[in-house]
Amino acid sequence: MKRPVYDLVICNVEGVYNKRNEIVNAVVTRSQSLVEGGKKQVNLKIQNLMKDVTKEDLVQWQQCDKSLNKIRDYVKEKKMFTRSGRDDHCFMERGGITYCRVDKDGCRNDQLVIPQGLRKAVMELAHSSLMGRHLGRKNTLARTRDKFMWPRMSSEIVRFCRSSDACQRTVDKGRIPKAKLGSMPIIDESFQRIAVDIVGPLEPRASDGSRYILAIVVYATRYPEAVTLKSCDTVSVAEALLSVFSRVGMPREVLSDRGAQFTSEMMKEFLRLLSVKGLTTTPYHAMCNGLVERFNGVLKKMLRCMSHEQPKEYHRYVDPILFAYREVPHASTTLSPFKLIYGHTVRGPLSLVKEAWEEEEGIQEGEDKMTVYEYLIKLRQRLSYTCKLAKNELEKAGETYRAYYDRKAKERTLSAGQKALVLLPTSGNKLLMHLKGLYDILRKVNKWNYVLSVNGQEKKYHINMLKHYYDREREDTQELAASTAVAIKDEVSEGSSIDVVPSYEQKENKNNVKVNDQLAEERRQEVNEVLEQYSALFSDVPGRTSSYTRLPPSPTKRGSEESDPNTALFKVDHHLCGLRAFSNTSLAPFLNCCSASA
């Protein structure tokens, strides 16, 4: 380089760099270390939601969109519309683009009118984009309404946010409403149905090697049993059940969860040999077996209190804890399990202290001694009375619990053919629930249980574990919309409104009804009289009222024609259809207006 302008020139010269030069390769940059360490920078993928739409395209789309026909008429009329208590607005054109000018509280805002083809992209940008943050319906509507406007915008945004896949899958567990509480059948026969469950594994392991406890509760008497186990396999559970059955007899039904030890083929055969019917709850819905689940919590709490000084000796405290539980009255039955089983109060520590202080020595002289027959008769009477009393108390307690539970519950129902998400535990922790899958609902078993198709298998779930999945509406073309009429019932959340461009001038009346020319003159005269009598019903302008009057109950027979509030409208429709006076023109638009007014 001859006569350089600068003293130092930094540049790349081909062939100078040697990849094998140890001195050059001794320096490792941050980017090189990431590549050599196997870590690559992940670039965010941002979807291009907005199409390459120019101003000319927007003007053309606005002019060709049939859903904006009424707005184009308002632009030509240049009228200002006032909605009481809200704002003033009008439609205008500026630079060929249609706007909705809104004046509210002294502030003017020009909202761009969006044609049908761009509405989905606008809603995606406002709700699902990187800067949209998947806000709720109210916030998404507010941020969209600040810049844009189109007919029925509120209802479309509500449906769009409701059908968002990400929002439906990541909704909080507490946001899924619970169904109202059902009622379990009242069992009035002791040991007819028992509830079983496994408590554990308990840490530390007991000195005898026990880690689990088999908990058993009798439905009729709330009588508990607990057996410590070293293992919770099917063989150990079956042997523990047999030891309990040998003392109290064989029950008719055994209710358990869907644990492997209760659903195995060995357990099914064990119950079949004993003529016992096995019942299981729905997956991950322990509320169905709430009786034994509540006892599990009480048992673990009592064990912690008794064995906090010797944690490895908790198995020695199981029997004393069971005695204490059986001796006190139960909250549901108001009677102790001991009294419901034996018909009398058992001798406990307090009874022994009382006897010692009173120096009682059994039966006093002069007391009447009962024969065995008399004792059995009185025992039977006491048991019958206590069981009847316990049943009545259980019914009262059930109504009380249901009333408290239903305060935050609501009626929920699903239908076959719909899709649902299932609230299932994560793979790492069964206590953490997450909405998974997208499964088809096959059929409805009862008010609370549904059968779903999960990976080709039929599985039954409680409705509290299910969330209805709303599919995103497909974008229909204008040609399809022109030849198809669809009636949609919009579901709008409380506090939101539907933006509908109203008709402020009456353009249709009874004169727009075409009467068949082939009718006789007398028939035509009858039709005209009916139309004249009900001329107020044939209007496309919605009415308004500020008050209403509640009529007294009609003395007519319930279900009669005079008691029907839609009798007048029904007479008009029936009379006109009977005359067959209309051809090519239907009364459906007028009757719909009448129904809305009524």
Image (spheres, helix red, strand yellow):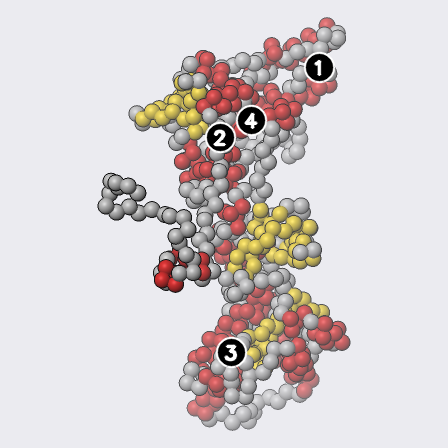
Disc 2 to disc 4, C-alpha distance: 42 Å
- The residue located at (66%, 33%) in the rendering is 559
Disc 1 to disc 3, C-alpha distance: 81 Å
The quadrant holding residue 223 is bottom right
Q: Which residue is mark 4?
A: 596
Q: Which residue is mark 2?
A: 52
Sequence-first disc among 3 and 4: 3
Q: Which residue is mark 1?
A: 583
Tag 1 and tag 2, C-beta contact below 8 Å: no
Disc 1 to disc 2, C-alpha distance: 47 Å
Sequence-first disc among 1 and 4: 1
In the picture, which quadrant includes the N terminus? top left
The quadrant holding residue 130 is top left
Sequence-first disc among 1 and 2: 2
Q: Regarding mark 3 in the picture, which secondary structure is present there?
A: loop
Q: Which residue is mark 3?
A: 202
> Amino acid under label 3?
Leu
- The residue located at (44%, 53%) in the rendering is 41
Between 370 and 534, the one nearer to me in the picture: 534
